[in-house]
Amino acid sequence: MTITDLDRTVTGRHEALVQEHSAHNYHPLPVVIAAAEGVWVTDVEGRRYLDCLAGYSALNFGHRHPVLVAAAKEQLDRVTLTSRAFGNDQLGPFCAELSALIGKQMVLPMNSGAEAVESGIKVARKWGYEVKGVAPDRARIVVMAGGFHGRTTTIVGFSTDPEARSGFGPFTPGFDVVPYGDADALAAAITPDTVAVLLEPVQGEAGVIVPPAGYLADVRRICDARGVLMVADEIQSGLGRTGHLLATRGAGVEADVYLLGKALGGGIVPLSAVVADAEVLGVLRPGQHGSTFGGNPLACAVGRAVIALLRDGALFDQARDLGRHLRTRLDELVGAGVVAVRTAGLWAGVDVDPRLGTGRAVSEAMARRGVLVKDTHGSTVRLSPPLVVGREELDQAVTALRGALAELAG
Ligand SMILES: *Cc1c(COP(=O)(O)O)cnc(C)c1O
């Protein structure tokens, strides 16, 4: 017997189309979203879910934040794309406002997070040759085991996740991998040819891994002592997720180069950026780097509205408050199906007892209870709700997790 289209649910019909015509590079939960507002999404069957993934932090302000939608609509009626062959009246203000927000002199606008990382790598290498004086083609960059920086060939080449790497070589040389959180290993890996240390201040995809206290300050000290750029990939950790504008700042540390993305586009457009002082970003000259869509007026207009929201520090206080609440509620589950909880602001990695099931099984059971989360590795689920979520909604998410654990315990 074959299943005809008529036999399928609406969800099933959408899934069949994706299965047949979309590359199989994802394994989504069986939820097909048709509409969203704030922290809630509605699927094609009319079921509502609390979104506790928030587009991996791309939706820090929730779905369709009215201020951001208004900025996008206004810009849609004026001009959307010019290419960088010409100027546009949103690019200058966007770069100036982001520079001021982050406290660095220059901005290189790109689109995806991976592009910001690639651009940061190019800039660090060029800085190494032109400013540090490394011999041609000798530059090395130290990266962290367990890190995640995107999916391009250079980036997966220095990933330690076999699934991300295997089958995609040969890879770009020039990267040295050290254990995350180990300052001695980092110091030992730096050579006279090292131009940068690239790291996430909190490892997101790895399961919200928070480094030991003092580690980021140690990294800063080592970079200063050895004349190496500290490049912080804040694509997921930045812009409020940890209860601070930047997770490094939350740790009292200033990086030389910030990589931003995800929430910078307000969940509306892809928008990423490399942010650094002129001594570093100034090494790029015309013709040496670019992007057709990078710095387009639509993305810049939305980005400016995002920056305006971020200028109000109240959002960060709220994220810290809500994060403390979430942490307290999740800690109640430790020993009751949960092995460990890690949090950084409103960002949680929850290790479920592997005997109960995989993170995937927990995510599916939570979805059946109307809460969307995403597994990371093994038996870990990650919660990163929009920063505009309410306390009662966080309680609802914890109740769904509790129910999922009970279901899996059978
Ligand atoms: C998501 C992410 C990226 C890649 O961003 P894309 O927009 O998916 O290319 C890079 N670094 C970190 C830390 C991320 O979380």
Image (cartoon, helix red, strand yellow):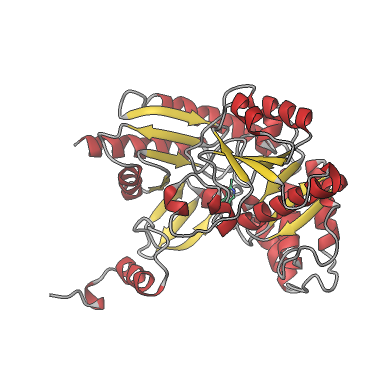
Foreground residue among 12 and 99: 99
The number of callouts visible is 0
Tell me residue 241's x, y (percent): 60, 40
- Could you tell me if residue 292 is visible in this image? yes
Q: Would you say 70 lies left or right of 207 here?
A: right
Residue at the spot 63% in from the left edge and 28% down from the top edge: 188
Q: Would you say 401 lies left or right of 385 here?
A: left
Foreground residue among 120 and 15: 120
Q: Would you say 78 lies left or right of 118 here?
A: right
Tell me residue 138's x, y (percent): 72, 48
Residue at the spot 84% in from the left edge and 53% down from the top edge: 283
Quarter holding the C terminus is top left
Quarter holding the N terminus is bottom left
- Dividing the picture into quadrants, the one containing residue 219 is top right
Residue at the spot 42% in from the left edge and 69% down from the top edge: 23
- Could you tell me if residue 74 is visible in this image? no
Foreground residue among 305 and 154: 154
Foreground residue among 377 and 297: 377
Tell me residue 33's x, y (percent): 43, 62
Tell me residue 272's x, y (percent): 68, 55
In the displayed structure, 340 sits above or below 128; it is: above
Q: Residue furthest left?
A: 1
